Each structure stands twice: as C-alpha cells, then as structure tokens.
Amino acid sequence: MKKKMALILCIAMAAMCLSGCSKNTESFATKQESKESLTTIRIWHDGDKAIMQMMEHRLNEALSDNGITVKFEQKSGLTDQIKLYESDEVNGPDMYMYAHDSLGMFVEMGALAPLADVIDKKVYADMLPMTLKAGNYKDSQYLMPVYFETLLFIYNKDLWEGEVPSTTDELYSYMKNHTDITKGTYALVNQHSTAYNVAPFINGFGGFIMNEQAKPGLSDEKTKEAVEYHKKFADLEADGDYNTVNALFNEGKAAAIIGGPWLIAGVKEAKINYGIKSLSDFTLPNGNALAPYSGVQGIGVMKHAAEAKKDAVAKVLEEIANPEIGIDLAENSGCAPANQKSYESKTVANDEMIAAMRRTADTAQPMPNIPQMSVMWGPTESLLAAVNKSGKDFSTAADEYQKVAENAIADMK
Amino acid sequence: MKKKNKFLPWGYSFSSILLIGLIVVFPIIYTIYISFTNMNLYHWTDYEFIAFSNYRRALTKLDSGFMSALFTTIIWTVLNMVIQIFVAYLVALGLNVKGLKLARLYKTLLMFPWAMPAYVSILLWRVGMYNPQYGLLNKILSALGFSKVDFLSENIPAFLSCMVLNLWMALPFLIMMMDGAFQSVDNSYYESAKLDGAGWWAQNLYITIPSIKPILAPSIIMTTFTTFKQFDIIYLLTMQKGSLTGATLQTVITYAHQNAFVSNNYGLSSAVSIVIFGFIILFSLFINRGIREEKA
C-alpha cells in the first residue's frame, strides 16, 4: 500500500512538473476573443513610477470615452524582458516606453512596427526634430517621442564665485584656481570616465564614438584630440564615480557638477541653492559649443499590437502627441517635453532647467540608436578609464580600444 | 517479481530525475544546441544550423586574451585558497581554545560577512573602503599624512583589493567548517599525545590535520570552485558599467562575459560557454583525481 501510494505521488509530481511547462491555450483563446483585451493597451517601461502613473492617469482620463484602458507596467531590465516577450501577445507588451538608444536592436529583432502602420505623420509633426531623429531607424519612424534628457551644468550659487564662464578654457582656469584635491574641495565634478558625460567634448571636437555607418570612432583624430583635451579637466574632477560626484556636490564640497535632470531631486533635498547653465553655452577652443548626447524617452509599438489593436494603439499615440501631456510632464516631473507646442506654456518656458535643456536640444546629438551602439559603451569607457584613471597614453589606448570595439561589433554577427 | 523490482526504483525517482533534467540537463543541452546555430540579433527567430563555425570563433578568442585570463584565474584561486585555509585554520583553532569567553558571540559575528548579500558587501567595500574620496583606507592614509591611493585603478592593487574582499566574504564559511571539524576530533588523542610529550606543532600536524582532512575536503572543493568561477567581486569592484576603475583584470568568467555576452550573439556566447564548461570539467577531474590519489 505504501509503495503504491509513493508511486502515485511520484507520478503526480512528474505530471505537475510537465504541466508547468505547458502553454495556457485556454487563457490565450479567451484573451484573444475578449473585446476587452482589444481595448486594453499594456505599455512596459523601466522609468520613474511617478511619471508613468501621471501619464497613465492622463491617458485613461482622455481615452475613457473610447473605452480604451492604458496600463503602464514597470519591468526592470526592460531590454531583456522585451527580448523574451516581444512576440508574446498574451504575456508581452503592446507598446513600450524607453530610451531611444535600444531602438535599432528591437527593430532588427523584428519586434517593432513603424508608426506609419498605425498613424499619420501629421500626428507627430510638432515634435522637436532632434527627438524625431532619435526615434527614426533606417528612414522609418518607430518611436513617438515623449520627453528628452540631456546633460546640464548645475552649480551651487553660494559656492561659485563670479559669473559662470562661457568658454571651456576659462572654465578650466577657474577649476585650477578653485580646486584643492588634498582638502577634497572641487570647482567642478563630472563622471569623467563615463562615455555619456564625455560625449559633449568628443562631439564638440568633431569626433564621434560611433557614426551612423556603425564605424567606431575611438581612434579618430578628433576623438583623440577631445580625449586629450578633456583629460586635464578629469584630473581636477575627483574620482568620477556617480555616487562620489553626487555626494561631493550635495555636501557642498564641489561648486558645480555636470549631470542630468535626474540629479535635481537630490540637489533640492540637500537644500543647495542651485543654478543651471546649458552645456551649449560653453564654447570649446575650436569655436564649437559642447554637444552632449540626448536621451529621448519614446513609445514604440510591438508588431502584433499594430495588427491586432491598431485602432486602440492609434488613439493612444494621438493622445501622447497632445502638447498637454508634455506640459503635465514638465510641470509635475521636470521633464523636457518632445513636443515643441508644449513650450508655448509660460510655466514650461520659464522653468530654468527645462529651458536649458530646450536650448541644448539645438546642439545636442541623439545617442546613436543603431544596435552596434550597445557594444560601444564598454570599449569607450575602458578607454576613458585607462586615460583618466590609470594614466595610460591616450593615443595608444585609443588604438587599442578601437580594436576591441571593432571585435565586439564583429562578434554581433 | 524481478521485473517489478527493476521498475520500482525508476518509478520512485522518476519525478526527481525529471526535475533535475528540466532544471540542470535541459539548459546545458539547449546551450549546446544554440552553440551550433547563428542565433543573434539579426537572426532572432530565423536562426540556422552552422556546424562548428561558432566554436572556431570561440577558440580564436581563446588565443587573444583567454590564456592571460586563465593565468590570472589560477593565481587568484591558488592564492585565495592557500590564505583562506591557513587563516581559517588559525582562527578556528583560536575559537576552540579551552576557556575562551564569548566564543559563541565571536562565531555569530564571524558569520556576518558570509550571511550578507554579496552585492551589498561589494558595494560597501567599494565605497566605504576603497573609494579615493570617502573610503576608510584613504581617510586613514590622509590622517597619517600620506597621499590618497586609488586602489582599483591599476591591476596589481586592484587584484589585491579584490582578494582582500573575497577573503572577508569567504573566510567565515571555512572557519565554521573547520570549527565543526575540530569538534569531531576525540579529545583522548590529544591527552595521549600530551602524555607522549607531543607539543602544539606535533599535535596539529599528526592529530588535528589528519583527523579533519576527510571532513573538510568537500568544503574545500566547493570553495575552490566558487573562487575559480568568482565573478561578482571583480566585476562589481572594477568593471561595473558606468563605473569602470581603469584596472583591466580579467578572470575566465569576466573574460567570457565581456567577450561574448554583451554582443547579443547567442550562438557565439553559447559556444564560448561550452568551451569554458569543458575547462571547468577538466579542472574538476584534475582535482578529484588529486584527492583520490591522496586517499590511496
């Protein structure tokens, strides 16, 4: 009896193991047939909860008459999640909202539908050209831009002496005179070995990390020139680690920091009397302005949703393109809207940080959105760390990491 | 009756075999399968069989930097294990000294680094110990009038810094294992040895070490493998995305990660994984053979 019971339990356990692997076809069929599922749009994101809740509330309010429900679902490690669920109509997203630099990867995977499959071009005609460029891949628009971010020069008004300079050479002179490494006080701190934070110099010098033809530019003469010029700044900018530079600025040990709008919450909490200057307002020795990268948060449509839920998706996109959403985002979360019309609002136009980002948008370059860019950050940051932290010769290091980058790109295929 | 007896054991263990098959064997077989295909970003769903092409590429990679990564890994494993065994032995001996007060408290405190999540420990050390601005070590150096040191920007100091952290995190386990093993040694051996005039060294060499060896062997093998395939410490201290320190330390696993897993080329990554898997199997055979020979 005991033996039989044990055998039955073993078989039951094995059956349970196998049933766990089975596909729930019933719920799939039910979902497909249900009218409700056709009007429910699930948007995956990996962003700020407050921003997403605000957008969800705004969209649901506007689309309630159409019977459309929008659900923003936060997924950590979004790119990996999309790789797994991109074609899963039941468990995957209908749309996703994320930074534009992974766009090319998703398009090459065959996950996304061009916006033209769902809406007319006119819907997104008012978006800033830079944000549209960010969401465009191989001449097709895939992302509806929502807001963008770019680096800013944030300074402590109580610590900074005199006017903030308008050339990088003057800035360097100020740094030399106001930095005491032994005491641990700095004029300016920056994540000097992070590619995104050094890009304003590289782009401003006419160099590039990667061009549109997917060619790495670490050994490009202009890039080398920029890295060499930037090194003297790095020597006066502390360790360059994200936490270190933020702590130095928020503790009043650094008079200025180069960072994004995401730092502002911490700066306010630290009760710093801060001012903001656009990086475009700094001129390099070659006469060009610093040209930071910009990151555009945009919404893309999964292929299956563009087919099965075309009408609902179109309504959602049209509502996202509404300038009012941009105004709400700017007023409540300090985001710089992608829609140019949102800047007609006085509160948006008068916001110091948003105005600085809007000004930077004219010189900022969207991060490359080609898939090869995903393997470029590593070699670029290794080059910067080798030069700025380990004191290696910039030219030799640039040639070495150019090869690393070329190998990494070759490995993708 | 005989037939029934043959079937029954399989019947009882079928569910476990199935579970192990699904969790352990299936991923390995699937990885081998993927390693023979061109599954990558550009062939996400339409991947094809490409025979040994990925293996040819994986072996070329082994030429370029793998050997130095393997050498670093061996040095890392040997140094860590020798120091761990030696220090753990001494600490465990100390904890077993007769009349030691608050021994339980010390043992509980010693468990702390081992019980803490590795990610938290590593980041704490990175910021709290090694950071050039805020780290305790640099604060001490500054207080003594020395200039600040960036412990993680050059390979040798970074290697030593990683090793110190690894010892801090891994020692408690071996100390506890040794402490447990010491409890199993019969006190009468020591009493007899003392009567025969054996000193501290002789007691350790001829009684303690031979007695605890068979009990400790599995823990030491486990720790050796954990040390060999260590990834978190080196990656999070020196290679974390956005916080590179300038050191270019590579172990076998960090090398594989950097060269294969960031490329979204799953075919090639799988081939590299299988080659490394082969190395680890060889390493384990080598160690097991060593142990068997020693037993004989």
Image (cartoon, coloured by chain):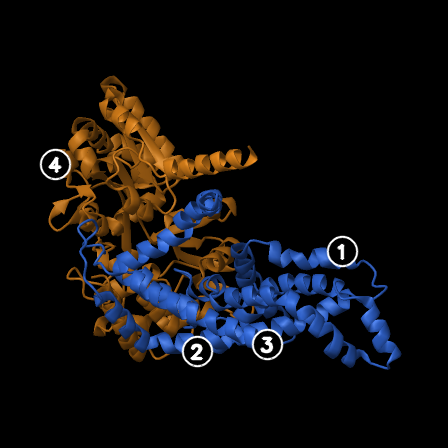
Chain colours: A orange, B blue
Q: Which residue is mark 3?
A: B296
- Name the chain under label 2: B
Q: Which residue is mark 1?
A: B105
- Name the chain under label 1: B
Of B275 and B233, the residue lying toward us = B275
Q: CA distance from mark 1 to mark 2?
A: 40 Å
Q: CA distance from mark 1 to mark 4?
A: 68 Å
- Residue drawn at (21%, 32%), measured in percent from left and top? A317
Q: In the drawing, does residue A350 fall left or right of residue B181?
A: left
Point out residue A186 in the picture as x, y percentages from the top left corner: 48, 64
Residue A367 can be seen in this image: yes
Residue A377 can be seen in this image: no
- Name the chain under label 3: B
Q: Which residue is mark 4?
A: A117
- Residue drawn at (76%, 68%), measured in percent from left and top? B94
Q: In the drawing, does residue B171 fall left or right of residue B151?
A: right
Q: CA distance from mark 3 to mark 2?
A: 30 Å
Q: Are marks 1 and 4 in contact (CB under 8 Å)?
A: no
